[in-house]
Image (tube, rainbow, N blue to C red):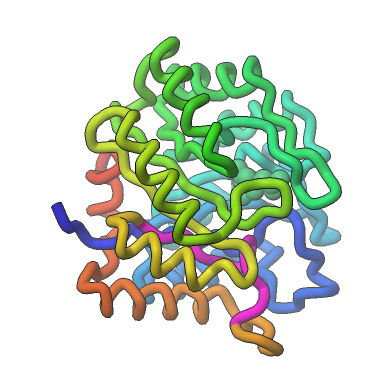
Amino acid sequence: MTTGTLITVAPTGAESAKADVPALPVTLDELVSTAKECEALGAAVIHVHIRDGEARPTLDLGRLRDTVAALRESTDLVVQLSSGGAVTDPEAARLAVLDAGPEMASCTMGTVNFGDDVFLNRWEFVVGLHTRMQERGVVPEYEIFDLGHLTALQRLLGKYGLPAGGHVHVDFVMGVPGGMPATAEALVACRQAVRDLPDGTTFSATGIGRGTIPVILASLSAGGHLRVGMEDTVTYAKGRPVESNMQLVARAVAFAQLAQRPPVTPAEARTLLGIPARS
Ligand code: KMH
Ligand code: ZN
């Protein structure tokens, strides 16, 4: 069945420094105004990493709570907190992200080399995230950095049951140095593996750096959804830095419209993802 396109914006991430990328939204005000503008353009979900007063990545719970509240007050976007954080964040702080009360949170399905670093996601930790999200009614987006992470997800769901809301949504993060490549072939391989997950499982995809456009095109043609943003891409085209997250969302919306799969609204996204409607 052809559906509209769920567009997630990932505006900040934990990897780029504000000094290197001045357009990166790092304060709460910058994040909220980015969120409002991206929603107006067609984004339905926001994947959130926050920064401290010095623009360094943080999982400070007070700041996370304030961020969730501010985004909910100013937008209708589905607020998805990152439980991935930065590669240096300890497991306890990553689990505690759920205490900030988001509707949705990311849940990475395995360990992956991450450039020169390691993004560690032990099985026991993944189980802990998944079950805590079930208990709290937080809907996960399972982050898939490599094909085997889908097999791990099949095992997780088989042993511990469906996530809150009963719907399974995965995001292919493609082109991290150490993970799967940002190619149409890799996306099709993942898409095939999704068929082994529960009926109705949906997927989005994001390509890091120059993988952005190939992954957008491949995902749209394979029936998938899109994630874009400065967490993943800080170069718009060869020699042209990204000016803003809005520029990336506008381009994704244009591609989705060309594919005759226009963006879904946040309310439609909640229905698609099994998230209760906002009252
Ligand atoms: N910053 C990466 C180490 C997530 O948000 O869940 C992890 C990441 C995945 O971005
Ligand atoms: Zn992230």
Res. 18 in view: yes
Residue 111 against residue 79 in the figure, above or below: above
How many numbered dots are placed on residues in this image?
Answer: 0
Residue farthest toward the bottom in the current orientation of the protein: 239
The answer to if 229 sits in the magenta stretch is yes
Viewer-proximal residue, 215 or 39? 215
In the image: residue 212, left or right of residue 271: right
- Identify the residue at horizontal 49%, vertical 73% (top origin): 213
Residue 62 percent across, percent down from the top left: 68, 40
Q: Residue furthest left?
A: 1
Residue shown at 54% from the left, 65% from the top: 32
Taking 228 as reference, is 260 left or right? left
Per the rendered image, the range of residues in magenta is 225-236
Residue 163 screen position, x and y as percent: 38, 25
Q: Nearer the viewer, residue 91 or 71?
A: 91
Residue drawn at x 58%, y 35% as measured from the top left: 108
Question: Does residue 35 appear left or right of residue 193 in this picture?
Answer: right
- Residue 63 appearing in the image: no
Q: Residue 164 appears at what percent x and percent y?
A: 36, 26
Looking at the picture, tell me which residue is in the foreground, 54 or 2.
2
Q: Is residue 149 above or below residue 86?
A: above
Q: Position of residue 132 (x, y in %)?
A: 52, 19
Q: Quadrant of residue 277?
A: top left
The C terminus is located in which quarter?
Answer: top left
Asked if the magenta segment contains residue 94, the reply would be no
Q: Residue at x 56, y 18 (%)?
A: 127
Q: Residue furthest top?
A: 159
